[in-house]
Image: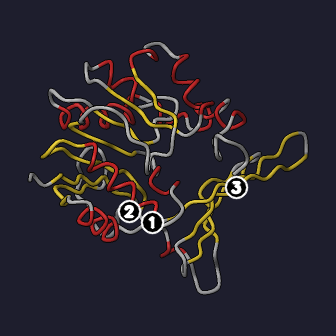
Amino acid sequence: MPDADGYFGEDIAATYDESSPDMFRPEAVDPVVDLLAELAGDGAALEFGVGTGRIALPLAARGVPVHGIEMSRAMADRLRDKPGGDSVDVTIGDFATTRVPGTFAVAYLVFNTINNLTTQDAQVACFRNAAEHLRPGGTFVVEVGVPDLRRLPPGQTAVPFRIGPTQWAFDTYDVATQAMSSHYVTITDGKAAHSSIPFRYVWPAELDLMARLAGMRLRDRWGEWSRTPFTGESTKHVSVWEKVAG
């Protein structure tokens, strides 16, 4: 990793919100907050990988107590500097293993953050950590893309997802290990700079098994936060697992 903040240090945190402006629009945020507030009810919420507070801050503004776990101090600093930032408690640490005080009605991971855990063992540990924080009947919510392997012809390992005059972005896949990396090429004043972030892609059925190992069972799975059906053509899923009472 580049530094103690992992791959989301000061250079990434400084422009993180601006790099994905569509994700901060009300039409992207409101359905997420609506569902999480419903699942939280009169309880508290725990966000794994809270980042700059895109979801945590509006959820806290709804009256839901929110605690976040975040490895990057630079990202957490951006959250604290925003209006309402003092309403979200943040613990610095790895969300696969870091424990915080309290019991929660809902724990959640959004925007492919489960893929930041680059081994299967770490992803399994994340599910166990979520279950240990939840009260009986509490829920764990994950939003993550479906691996885009159908776009890979034999011999190809890269799939582009953003092509523009000054930036190219593409994912590379290793189908033997489920390792993937997102690559960004940015052109400034005629010079190209390249950066990459490693991930591990994971299938819905594999996540269901991780949940079972942690004492949870699948309750719902949708193709979007608006609760559209999940189908074979869905490019992502929002899944809800419930901690089994007793």
Residue 54 location in percent, x, y? Answer: 45, 30
Residue for badge 1? 121
- The picture places residue 65, in percent across and down from the top left corner, at 29, 23
Q: Which residue sits at x=70%, y=55%?
A: 196
**Residue 196: mark:** 3
Marks 3,1: beta carbons within 8 A: no
- Residue at 39% in and 16% down: 87
| Pointer 1 local density, CA inside 10 Å: few below 14, some 14–19, many at least 20 | few
Q: Amino acid at mark 2?
A: Val
From the viewer's perspective, is residue 48 above or below residue 221? Answer: above
From the image, tell me which residue sits under label 2. Answer: 124
Where disc 2 sits, the SS reads: helix
Q: Report x, y in % for residue 221.
A: 23, 57
- Element at label 1: helix
Is residue 131 shown left or right of residue 79? left
The residue under the point 23% across, 37% down is 35
Q: CA distance from mark 1 to mark 2?
A: 5 Å
In the rendered structure, the answer to whether residue 73 lies left or right of residue 224 reads right
Q: Are marks 1 and 2 in contact (CB under 8 Å)?
A: yes
- Amino acid under label 1? Asp
